[in-house]
Amino acid sequence: MKLARVIGTVVTPVQHKAFDGQRLLAVRPIEPDGTDAADRMFVAIDRVDAGVGDTVLLMAEGSSTRDLLGMGEVPIRCSIVGVIDEIEVAGETLYGPE
């Protein structure tokens, strides 16, 4: 699992049939304090109705994602499985409402 921020939506006029009816979002990995973790992004299936700007919990293991979605052998690697409100480590809030 990874922490990520939703940075945009993905529209694909031609796609694998496994993506039919799925909402695809562009996400960027982040550190627990909310700063960017890498200069890269992933495309993830949205399972929790996340939106641009949301901090999310990203399942980024292909076989686990396919098992969760019950999709068998399809080209899916990432799915958004939660929207994060707050991250606390050792009693200190690293991310969340002030």
Image (spheres, rainbow, N blue to C red):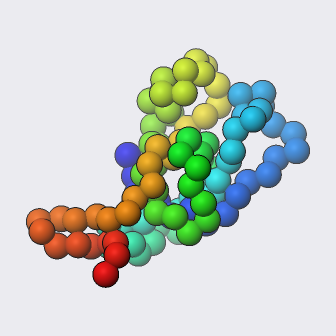
- Residue at 68 percent across and 47 percent down: it is 24
- Residue at 61 percent across and 43 percent down: it is 45
Residue 9 horizontal side relative to residue 73, left or right: right
Residue 56 horizontal side relative to residue 1, left or right: right
Q: Nearer the viewer, residue 92 or 71?
A: 92
Q: What is the quadrant of residue 71 in the picture?
A: top right
Image spot of residue 79 (x, y percent): 53, 42
16 lies above or below 51: above
- Residue at 22 percent across and 65 percent down: it is 88
Q: Nearer the viewer, residue 9 or 29?
A: 9
Q: Is residue 66 visible?
A: no
Query: In this figure, what is the number of numbered marks?
Result: 0
Image spot of residue 91 (x, y percent): 12, 68
Residue 17 horizontal side relative to residue 88, left or right: right
Image spot of residue 18 (x, y percent): 71, 28
Q: Residue furthest top?
A: 72
12 lies above or below 9: above
Q: Is residue 65 visible?
A: yes
4 lies above or below 36: above
Image spot of residue 69 (x, y percent): 54, 27
Q: Quadrant of the C terminus?
A: bottom left
Residue 61 horizontal side relative to residue 45, left or right: left
- Residue at 58 percent across and 18 percent down: it is 72
Q: Residue furthest right?
A: 13
Q: Residue furthest left?
A: 90
34 lies above or below 84: below
